[in-house]
Amino acid sequence: MIWPILKTMKTTIGSKRFTVNFPEERESMPDNYRGMLRLDMNTCISCSACAIICPNKTITMVDVVTAKGVKKMPQIGIERCLFCALCEEVCPPKCLTLTKNYDYEVYDKRELLKNPADLE
C-alpha cells in the first residue's frame, strides 16, 4: 500500500525545481504585471495630475532643481502604493509608467519613499 505513495513522491520531488535563485535568476512577469514606478524627469510637465488622482495620496509633488530651473515632480511612497495605474493613465506626457520590477525589499521603511531622482 505504501509503494504507490513513495513512487508518486519520487516523481514529484525529483522532476522540476519550483523556486529560482533570487536575485541571480528572476521570474518572468506577465504582460499585465504592475511593478515599480518609473519617472522620466525630462518629459514631466509638473501638472500634478498624478498626485490629484492617486486614491491613497501616495504621490506628493516636491521641488527639484533641474537645468531649466526648479520644477515640481512626483515623490512616491511605495509602501502605500496600490499599483492601480491611475497615475500612469492620467499623465499627459506619459512620463510616469509602471515597470515589471518587483524588487521592493528594504531594511528601513524610510527607503520606500522614492524621490524623483530615485524613480529614473
Image (cartoon, rainbow, N blue to C red):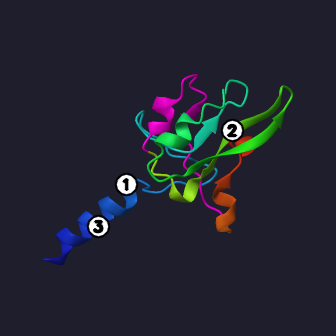
Q: CA distance from mark 2 to mark 1?
A: 50 Å
Name the residue type under label 1. Ser
In the image: residue 67, left or right of residue 85:
right
Label 2 SS: strand
Looking at the image, tell me whether mark 2 or mark 1 is earlier in sequence order: 1
Q: Nearer the viewer, residue 116 or 10?
A: 116
On the image, which quarter does residue 49 sit in? top right
Q: How many marks?
A: 3
Which residue, given by chain and number where applicable, does mark 2 sit on?
Answer: 73
Label 3 SS: helix
Which residue, given by chain and number where applicable, does mark 1 sit on?
Answer: 15
Give percent across and percent down for residue 63: 76, 42
Query: What's the residue at 71%, 31% (across, down)?
Result: 41
> Residue 9: which numbered mark, if any?
3
Q: CA distance from mark 3 to mark 1?
A: 10 Å
Is residue 120 among what the camera can see?
no
Estimate how packed mark 3 is, as few (under 14), some (14 to 19) or many (20 or more) residues with alpha carbons within 10 Å: few
Give percent across and percent down for residue 6: 25, 71
Please, which residue is most extreme toward the bottom here?
A: 2
Instruction: Read off the magenta span.
Output: 84-106
Q: Main structural element of the magenta stretch: helix, strand or loop?
A: loop
Label 1 SS: helix
Tag 2 near tag 1, CB within 8 Å = no
Query: What's the residue at 50%, 45% (across, down)?
Result: 27
Query: What's the residue at 31%, 60% (across, down)?
Result: 12
